[in-house]
Image (cartoon, rainbow, N blue to C red):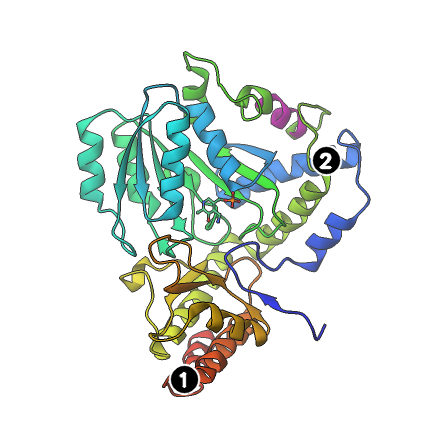
Amino acid sequence: MKSRKLLMIPGPIEFEPKVLQALGAPTASHVAPNFIESFGNCIELMRKVWLTSTGQPFIVSGSGTFAMDMVAANLIEPNDHVLVISTGYFGERFAEISKRYGANVTILAAEIGDIVSLDDIEKALSIKKYKLITITHVDTSTGVLVDPKPIAELAKKYNTLSILDGVCSVAGEEIRQEAWGIDVVLTASQKAVGVPPGLALLVVSQKALGAFKNRKTPVCNYYADFNNWLPIMQAYENRQASYFGTPPVNLIAALEVSLRQIVAEGMENRFLRHQKIATAFREAMLALGLKLLPVYKNLSANTLTAVYFPKNITGSIFLSQVGKNDVILAGGLLPSHKTLYFRVGHMGSVNNNDILATIAAIESALFANKVSFEMGIGLKTALKILNK
Ligand code: PMP
């Protein structure tokens, strides 16, 4: 396909042909034996991808925001205290959602490109009793990666539920839900999980389900209520027909294909592939003289990279020049810095050729803008890392 452009934004990403074929297959009844089997398989496969044997998966129509909404609707009661660790736009969103359900929200916000220190988190947790703490694993607005493991340990120490927004990390960044003791890990289908947009995916620990069952007030969101969805998930896992809301049959068929591909690659291999490609891309950008949004290299995500435009060029023109080189990138998202940087997604089935094509397209756009740099230095830097 000579006219095909490479989609390198942080979601939706490029999808595997077999996943897309599953989407285009004739739609089954939601109570057909083959669909029930597929749904049950997805539930079992999610545990393998999330690395938990005891968590309860939920697969529901909706985007990542709905997955966040579902957590808040079910685990927050009016006047509960919620601690939001914010590294950008999506941390702020979790605060807003939590307030809708009556929470008293405390936000610990990092400086742009930085993270909140563990000391500050522990200080906050020791002052008052929080029902839950939210962490954005990778904030897609900044490309900052937070290490959720020590934060989940703190949450456990202070008897607080830990919620990980893994929309831009699940199936790309290392997450070991059970070993790390994270209570909820949520995501959406269109990123590293590798399925077109439309599925909210969550895995909820037994401890969090216990907290849900101990609620004193009813869940005030009908569609999100675990009471409606838990029996459905359990029925499908037991390979029985069930109905609450019509499931997105084709998306679930596509999810099974993608989860099988992820499990076949192996989680360790997948984490390493993401790390290698991300390192190659980051180092290429630095070699080209560009600056990253994360203030330290070890805070940079492996699923996307946020890069400042060179000085004196108009970002929108630069991105359209990269687009003319057949690579689609995303602009900035943080309102205060929107026009100052761009974002490149490298997750899911991304391969070495994709990242090299992206670097080449960026080099060509820099050249067109008369930015001074050594032509090919980005590619050379990346190739050295990819060939290690
Ligand atoms: N959290 C994070 C970290 C995200 O990157 C996104 C989407 N970019 C969301 C939440 C919201 O997901 P959605 O757009 O699917 O509603």
Please say whether residue 319 is visible from this viewpoint.
yes
Prevailing SS of the magenta stretch: helix
Amino acid at dot 2: Glu
Residue 267 in the image, given as x and y percentages of width and height:
51, 53
Q: Secondary structure at mark 1?
A: helix
Q: Please state which amino acid type lies under the numbered disc 1.
A: Ile
Residue 54 seen in this snapshot: no
Disc 1 designates what residue?
377
Q: Is residue 15 above or below residue 100?
A: below
Q: Residue at x 60, y 34 (%)?
A: 60
Which of marks 1 and 2 precedes in the sequence? 2
- State left or right for residue 289 relative to residue 195: left
Q: Tell me residue 198's x, y (percent).
A: 61, 42
Q: Which residues lie in the magenta part?
A: 230-236
Say whether residue 101 is magenta: no
Residue 278 lies in what quarter of the image? Answer: bottom left
